[in-house]
Image: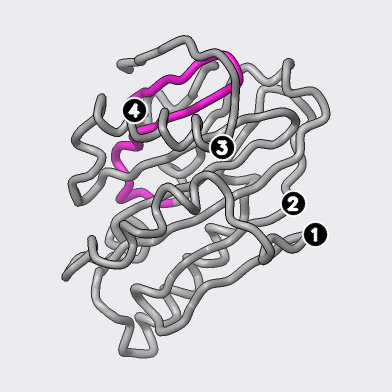
Amino acid sequence: MTTIRTSVGVFSSIFAVSCLSMAHAQQANLSAHVHGVSELNIVIGGNKLEMQLRSPAINIVGFEHKASTEQQIRKVKQSEVKLNDHKALFSFSSGGCRLTQAKIDLSDLIEHKTTEKDAHTHDHHKSDLDHSHEHEDEDEHGDHSEIVAHYYYDCEDMDELSSISLGFFDVFPAMQQINGIWITTSEQGAASLTRSNKTITF
């Protein structure tokens, strides 16, 4: 696993987005639509942790066009259930992190299909990762369909959180590589994760 780490000073929304852009430049292949390869962005600040998965739809549902048959629609719905099962997707070393919202965007596959599960509404604001990609989403996909999943956590003791292990490779076998980028209060980093090396260490 190749890991890139850069020390940063203070955490702010503008700085977080800026650092994510820098990390994108360090891993230029993240912007390419490659089957089997997904992207995971992580922002940590205070007791808040946000993760955003962006993946070609074929990695998750097996196709990239609009679902038209009953079988395809059923596959999308099954994948939605799996993406909402955050405990199967993320394993925290510690920190007492509790999911407050999961937001799954399947609109590339089914019209107006974005689902949210949360304890607290987020409609009144957009997060760092929402802002960093909202303009990209308008034009970038073309014929390529993408699934975007957001996960929001509150953590009791963020200082104790030292790593996150990913379960995506087991849940979605077509997913071969996840390019991870993270921003914390003290550093930014990037790593290429695979089935045999699936843990991000802060």
Tell how many labels: 4
Mark 3 → mark 2, Cα distance in angstroms: 19 Å
**43 lies left or right of 180:** right
Tell whether label 1 touches label 2 (CB within 8 Å).
Answer: yes
Asked if the stretch drawn in magenta spans residue 192, the answer is: yes
Q: What's the mark number on residue 23?
A: 4
Residue 60: percent from left, percent from top: 37, 59
As drawn, 19 above or below 149: above
Asked if the stretch drawn in magenta spans residue 174, the answer is: yes
N-term mark: 2 or 4 = 4
Q: What's the mark number on residue 119?
A: 1
Q: In terms of secondary structure, where does tag 1 sit?
A: loop
What amino acid type is highlighted by mark number 2? Thr
Nearer mark to the viewer, of 4 and 3? 3
Task: Sort mark 1 into few (<14), some (14-19) or many (20+) by Cα contacts within 10 Å.
Answer: few
N-term mark: 2 or 1 = 2
Residue 152: percent from left, percent from top: 65, 47
Task: Sort mark 4 into few (<14), some (14-19) or many (20+) by Cα contacts within 10 Å.
Answer: many
As drawn, 183 above or below 135: above
Rendered image quadrant of residue 90: top right
Q: Which residues are magenta?
A: 172-193
N-term mark: 3 or 2 = 3
Nearer mark to the viewer, of 3 and 2? 3
As drawn, 125 above or below 168: below
Q: In terms of secondary structure, where does tag 4 sit?
A: helix
Mark 1 → mark 3, Cα distance in angstroms: 23 Å
Tell whether label 2 touches label 3 (CB within 8 Å).
Answer: no
Mark 4 → mark 3, Cα distance in angstroms: 15 Å
